Amino acid sequence: MDRTAEVRERDVDRVLKSAHAMDLRLVRFLYVDFGGIVRGKATHAAGLADRVDEGIALTTAQMASNALDDLLDIPGMTAVGEVRLVPDPTSFTVLPYAPRTGQMTCDLMTLDRQPWAFCPRAVLRRAIAAAADEGLDVQAVFENEFYLLREEGGGLVAADDSPCFSTRGMDAHAPFTDDLIAALEAQGIQVEQAVAEHGGGQQELSIRHAPALAAADHQVVFRETAREVARQHGLRASFAAKPFADQVGSGAHVHLSLWDVGSGENVFYDPGAERGFSELGRQFVAGVLDHLPGLVALTCPTVNSYERLLPRAWASAYTTWGFDNREAAVRVPSTFWGREQGTTNVELKAVDPTANPYLALAGIIAAGLDGVRRDLSPGDPAGVDPATMTPEARADAGMRRLPETLDAALTALAADQVLVGALGADCHRGYEAVRRSEADAYRDMELERIFAEHRRRY
């Protein structure tokens, strides 16, 4: 037995013992589809020992569902054929909000035990492996903003009208926040900060970074947990990018750093460089900016996402970067005193919580590594809001406007050989078909209804 098999066997044994000790009845096997919806099946605990190895059957057609739950006709994802939901035992958690229930995130495997071409988790695994081939370990985290809503008059409205960062906003939902933190901690996720954000009812809870695959898994856990804890408080948690036309949008900014596998040091940190940010870090940023027009099709993947990606909206609208520039697409945050190496990272602001976290993170890694391999330069850091510059000045600085519609972003993605290569041809084909179908579905819909549909669906 090789070491990988031995480690998995130990992890599986831990899951089985935990499930027995906690007297679980059901264990959910979860995956995230191309529409960013978390789906899955549950096995009875009596069959867990078998199913943790053999998986649960899933029709290949299920990945052809879009976020509106329309089932599309996509070759390779039809009513004929099955794959298996094979769980990753390291992702096992006992759900604090559902009685006698656990869950694991899954890889989609073919019947001959190979990664399915349409599996988002397999795409991220390949991106992580590509970084490892360069001697690099990827650490990341999604920093979520979301709205707390309540039902009123047959619709969903903001749960409060508190000012940004106000104690009134903190107090309004203190019981919810405490229960959410407790639920996340019970699942092994450490919360670092909690903020009542700019929009009425908008919250932000930041969690600790993790290795890239675990970071994507944590994003699934975070979204699922926030929704259910909100429901238990008589509220709805919406992760839509722009729930209301007259309020700020919600991001899921990705913070990321690269670490040398041999030395264990953060390769984005260089004490002799400007602001301690290394040349390799700049190359990574340059790669992200170079591919960003196509990348946003993965990180900002809904029609509604492009109501958020506007100038002067604290969400980024141009391909630029800067130190502590919150209108830049990529921000290099200030480090913390005495922890400069450990806290040097980059933040991609052009990400929202509707993204499939596995595809989003894989795309970011692929784009950044391309910049490193090609020795790209991001140019000078922007010291002002790009929207305050003249069009000529932005052009001289190499700043491009990000796509203004999902259609435009998908077209840019299709033209980006690096990103399509990272996804794989089949995965890209399936993803584009699903997202194009959503763009078509909303094309002739009234704008207010589009906002309403997204705040309810996400």
Image (spheres, rainbow, N blue to C red):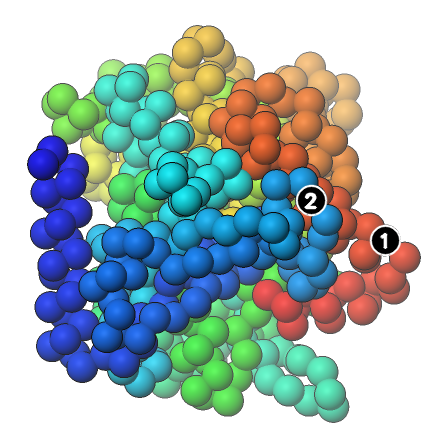
Q: Nearer the viewer, mark 1 or mark 2?
A: 2
Sequence-wise, the earlier of marks 1 and 2 is 2
Alpha-carbon neighbours of circle 2 within 10 Å: few (<14), some, or many (≥20)?
some
Left or right: residue 70 versus residue 329 is: right
| Residue topped by disc 2 | 74
Label 1 to label 2, Cα distance in Å?
21 Å
For the point 81% across and 57% down, the residue is 442
Nearer-the-camera pick, 17 or 238: 17
Q: Position of residue 279 (x, y in %)?
A: 35, 15
Q: Is residue 411 above or below residue 316?
A: above
Alpha-carbon neighbours of circle 1 within 10 Å: few (<14), some, or many (≥20)?
few
Amino acid type of disc 2?
Ile
Residue 134 seen: yes
For the point 23% across and 79% down, the residue is 24
Q: Position of residue 424 (x, y in %)?
A: 53, 29
- In the rendered image, the quadrant that contains the N terminus is top left
Q: Position of residue 367 (x, y in %)?
A: 49, 25
Single out the residue that lies furthest toward the right.
444
| Residue topped by disc 1 | 443
Residue 254 seen: no
Amino acid type of disc 1?
Arg
Nearer-the-camera pick, 295 or 42: 42
For the point 26% across and 54% down, the residue is 53
Left or right: residue 188 versus residue 146 is: left
Q: Is residue 306 above or below residue 266?
A: below
For the point 72% across and 19% down, the residue is 395
- In the rendered image, the quadrant that contains the C terminus is bottom right
